Image (tube, coloured by chain):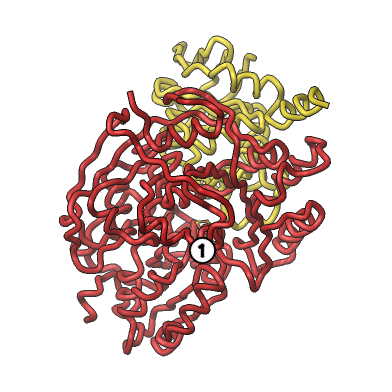
Amino acid sequence: MIITGRVWKFSDDIDTDAIIPARYLNTSDPAELAGHCMEDADPDFSKKVKPGDIIVAGKNFGCGSSREHAPLAIKGAEIEAVVAASFARIFYRNAFNIGLPIFESPDAAAGIREGDRIRIDSAGGLIYNLTLDEEYRATAIPPFMAEILAAGGLINQIRRQVKDNV
Amino acid sequence: MGMTITEKILAAHCGRDRVAPGELIKARVDLALANDITAPIAIAEFNKIGVARVFDRDRIALIPDHFTPNKDIRSAEQAQIMRQFARRYQITHYYEIGRMGIEHCLLPQEGLTLPGDLIIGADSHTCTYGALGAFATGVGSTDLAAAMATGEVWLRVPETVKVVFKGANWQPWVGGKDLILYLIGRIGVDGALYQALEFTGEAVAALSLEGRLTMANMAIEAGAKNGIFTPDEKTRSYVEGRAKRPYKFYESDKNARYSRVLELDSGAIEPQVAFPHLPENARPISEVGTVQIDQAVIGSCTNGRIEDLREAAAVLKGKKIDPRVRLIVIPGTQEIYRQALTEGLIEIFIEAGAAVSTPTCGPCLGGHMGVLAGGEKAVSTTNRNFAGRMGHPESEIYLSGPAVAAASAILGRLGGPGEVE
Ligand code: SF4
């Protein structure tokens, strides 16, 4: 999978309350959640972001709550991928489970600036900065999790297993 | 090479003799839980799988605790989705308003989380049950949906960080909350990312089960996958009489492998306060300076248990809270509420000028029952002080144990119980 897009840059320790504040958790509709995506980190984000954009952040992205509303809000905003120096673990697995591509790369997080255009080659684990002409390496995705992504998320994968067992 | 308690429990749940850190396994779950926020997404995903029934109706717990008693029509509709699912699939452990409690206070009390269990919950503080010697970890709604259908979860076996709290010579008013805030202050909010935190040492052996629940609860605040204690006689006396199925005690081998061993001197730990906006901003109470507060919250899955209410009442007894402060006390479950009534604690709170609420998560996540306005400051016994967590993005949360929260309510500013005695 090749993903190309424009970057929105965020700092370290972006928590799930910043990604989608609890006051909006009385719904689970991705389109509605998308309207408040990243609101407490950048109040105008949902107005500025365009389909196909990419989020790049520092360490521990998605720390805090287990709310799947967080990756759903990002996916709902049609953000193609998230790159971070590291991810909080529940956010990490949630992203794979719902089929949101995410890439761990401290070098990319350090090198990429807001507004840069980047290209991600998920199979090769390479992130190329088209604006700066720089390349960064992402942590390899374990095959087991690549399968979940390829199936389009955990539920699709399990649905197939359940069918096979019948 | 030996195994840690976490590795042993994971191995037992994937039918193997041993597992090693880094391995991805499919494990059998003993209990899967969700709440009124996370269950609706899990239910929608479950419905997509296309199975006729849940894997085991006795091993799923559904608890309406976040926006309940419902704060608005939409949250009522979310709770309704969960209630209807519970009826349709005859879920044994569904708890209705009036009989419920905050999930992580309720389930140990009901004997549903047991030593040696593998528990997943669509709530990040599922790690609380590690206090009983279980492997317990938070997952998302999709994981939960898969587990409700198959009874299994995929997990990466974590490395373990061992934390030794040496000595049991506490300073006055120091409890589990102070130990865990101090630790997070030392290692940071990603100090144990993807790893297990194993708590050991004389101090945790001396700690009550409730204090251990408080500590395990906040393992996630250091980024950990789970926090775990070795079960002992205190664990046994807590689970005996509550457990509704067999349980098993595991302990780490002497030659188990740790990614890191951290030794902390318990006697040097003062009551702690974590400053905005991260739990790692912990400071000893002697260094908090002058911070006026508008609200104090005593409750949540971290500190809403009877021991916490007793501690707060001991500080508040015969005192009045500062006229500028709103103190909100929230017992964690109906049983805790009743116990507090019987012991006269509720009367102490009301006499002091506090509002006492029915069990709910409420203000902990800025839901209802004490949401903050812009510029307001709260001291809270909850577990997260992220910007906007309790309401307005420009409000501030200071995390502490119950004694400091109660003392601060009396003082009208951050302060320790020593100042009001
Ligand atoms: S009390 Fe707070 S931290 Fe605990 S489950 Fe409720 S919202 Fe989450």
The percent position of residue B103, horizontal first and vertical second, equals 56, 59
Q: Is residue B297 visible?
A: no
Q: Measuring 42% from the left and 72% from the top, which residue is drawn there?
A: B295
Residue bearing the label numbered 1 = B241
Q: Is residue B388 visible?
A: yes
Looking at the rendering, in which quadrant would you find the N terminus of chain B?
top left
Q: Residue B420 appears in which quarter of the rendering?
A: bottom left
Residue type for callout 1: Gly
The percent position of residue B358, horizontal first and vertical second, equals 57, 75
Q: Measuring 72% from the left and 57% from the top, which residue is drawn there?
A: B78
Looking at the image, is B227 positioned above or below residue B266?
above
The percent position of residue A64, horizontal first and vertical second, equals 48, 46
Looking at the picture, tell me which residue is in the foreground, B248 or B388: B248
**In the figure, what tint was chain B given?**
red
**In the figure, what tint was chain A given?**
yellow
State left or right for residue B416 relative to residue A85: left
Ligand 1 within 8 Å of disc 1? The answer is no
Looking at the picture, tell me which residue is in the foreground, B70 or A3: B70
State left or right for residue B252 relative to residue B164: right
Looking at the rendering, in which quadrant would you find the C terminus of chain B?
bottom left
